[in-house]
Amino acid sequence: MEPLILKNRNNTFGEVITGFDFSSFKYEYEKNNERSISFTVEKNTQNADIFNQIVNEMLLEWEGQLYPIKSTSIKFDGVKLSNDVIAKHIFMEFQNHYIQKDINNNDSSTEDKKIKINLQDYLNFGFKNNQLDYTFEIIGNFDKFVYIDELGNKNGLEFLAEGAELFNYIYFADNKKFYIYDESTFYKMSNTPLIYTFNSSEAQATITTTDLKTYIQGFGGKLTSKDITNYNPIKPPNISYSGKFIKDGTWRTEEVGASYQKTFECKHGKEELSWTLKKMSKGGKVDIYLDGELIGNYKCYSKNATTERIVIAKNLSEGQHTFKAIFRGAIKGIDYKKSNPCMYVGTEKSTLLNLTANLKGNELYKFYAEHKSDNFNLYPFAEAPTVYNDNVKDRDELLKEIKAQLNDQPTVEITTNYLGSYEDRKYIQDEDISENSMVRFIHDPLGYDLDLKVVKLTKSHPILQQPVEVDFSNSPKDILRIQQNFNRKVRKIGSSGGSQSESSFSMPENYSDIVGVTILDD
């Protein structure tokens, strides 16, 4: 029997704990969450010294793993003195490592900047300079890059949990070493299947449509301020001229009727076109046209050289537009002395025209996609939360993402029992299943043939030989056949007018609820 050992942090003390209640002992595991052990120990004449040493932050060693004691509750009922103990696996103390914000990649002066990173670099950043001696090893295939707003600024466990969401990995620790798995590498097929009539006697399937959605929208590729604000500066060398122009210093013409024009493209719609009017002492009159329509008459004259920014149009439609300026000659009442009046354009490097798109909300995204589920006409209209992804490259990528996020199938929960082989009936025992087990579930009457993956595990002390409590999960594609079977049944109901939010069917025989098999969407 594996002993439960009490140790100190310096590893200079170690003693086997006796006198604890075996029936109170629990080992609990939850995927990408926590591992812990708990038990109750009573003080007696044989364990008085060790009982007094069971205090917070001492270490428990169980099956080669260390569990710091995090909770103790001393109780006295007038006869017995006992202590309820909860100890968390030592990997959870990684939360005591704080990961500082990466200032180099989080420059607040750089607007809309995302950090592109792969898994190796992500974990290197999170584990570097940790004073608690935690390490990691990647096992499996992780080749994708992700974009994140901020790197760091959280504790170690928060960082690991965020990484699991970003890269879809499973972490499992051997004391202070984290192993980072992809799902196919982590799970191993168990030698113990669950087969109706062979080693299980009943099964119940509960199907709910509470969280089912049939429609989803998405916006992707968010525009930055550079994409929409003064995004198309047009300079004098970039425009077309008609007539004689002087192209040195401040470009200009003295020829009445001479003109310049530029055809430009509004990329987004709702653009504002601004024009920079150069004014000097020889300036005359200018007519401005947009798309062939006269916008107004402007004067280029000013006693002192100056420039004026003028908004020519707002809310321009997406597509091509043409700006044109025509010189109309002298301004009445201005004494040009011996000089000829002129129309000024600007210096070679000055900005003559520019565009700004006045966009708000969803208009700030380049791509839009919507998707109706194949079950759209089968179930009532139900819209899922809109997806926003700033970093998608095109509409196809956005559409793929919103399809993946739409939960358009009923939720299926399965409960079964396990009796063992016909000759040796028993419940699932400690040696039958582990944290990374995958179990085959076969039930012909209900039409199930699935690989179920352990996501939660509770074990009693091995000496008791008690059943193991297990929660399973499988991927949406594995459960699809069951969901499709249910959908076909709904179609048969057809126009009967029934609204079904929950359906349950079972085959009870010698009911036992020892093993709960819960199927969750990964």
Image (cartoon, rainbow, N blue to C red):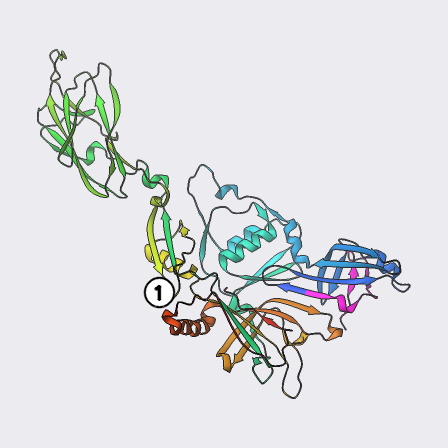
- Does 11 lie within the magenta span? yes
Q: What count of labels does the image hold?
A: 1
At 55% across and 53% down in the image, what residue appears? Answer: 124
Q: How crowded is mark 1: few (under 14 residues within 10 Å), some or many (20 or more)?
A: few
**Residue at the bottom extreme?**
423
Judge whether 316 appears above or below 332 on screen: below
The amino acid type found where label 1 is placed reads Asn
- Name the spot of residue 32 as percent of width and height, x first: 58, 60
Quarter of the rendering containing residue 358: top left
Please give the range of residues in magenta: 1-27
Q: Of 152 and 450, which appears nearest the observer?
A: 450
Judge whether 412 appears above or below 223 on screen: below
- Name the spot of residue 334 as percent of width and height, x first: 14, 13
At 27% across and 38% down in the image, what residue appears? Answer: 271
Along the horizontal axis of the image, is 247 left or right of 306? left
At 50% across and 60% down in the image, what residue appears? Answer: 168
Judge whether 417 appears above or below 214 on screen: below
Q: Of 240 and 63, which appears nearest the observer?
A: 63
- Name the spot of residue 59 as percent of width and height, x first: 75, 58
**Quadrant where the N terminus is found in the figure:** bottom right
Q: What element carries label 1?
A: loop
- Does 393 lie within the magenta span? no
Question: Is residue 62 shown to the viewer in this render?
Answer: yes
Along the horizontal axis of the image, is 473 left or right of 318? right
Question: Is residue 9 shown to the viewer in this render?
Answer: no
- Name the spot of residue 285 as percent of width and height, x first: 14, 21
On the image, numbered disc 1 is attached to which residue? Answer: 377
Q: Of 156 and 240, which appears nearest the observer?
A: 156
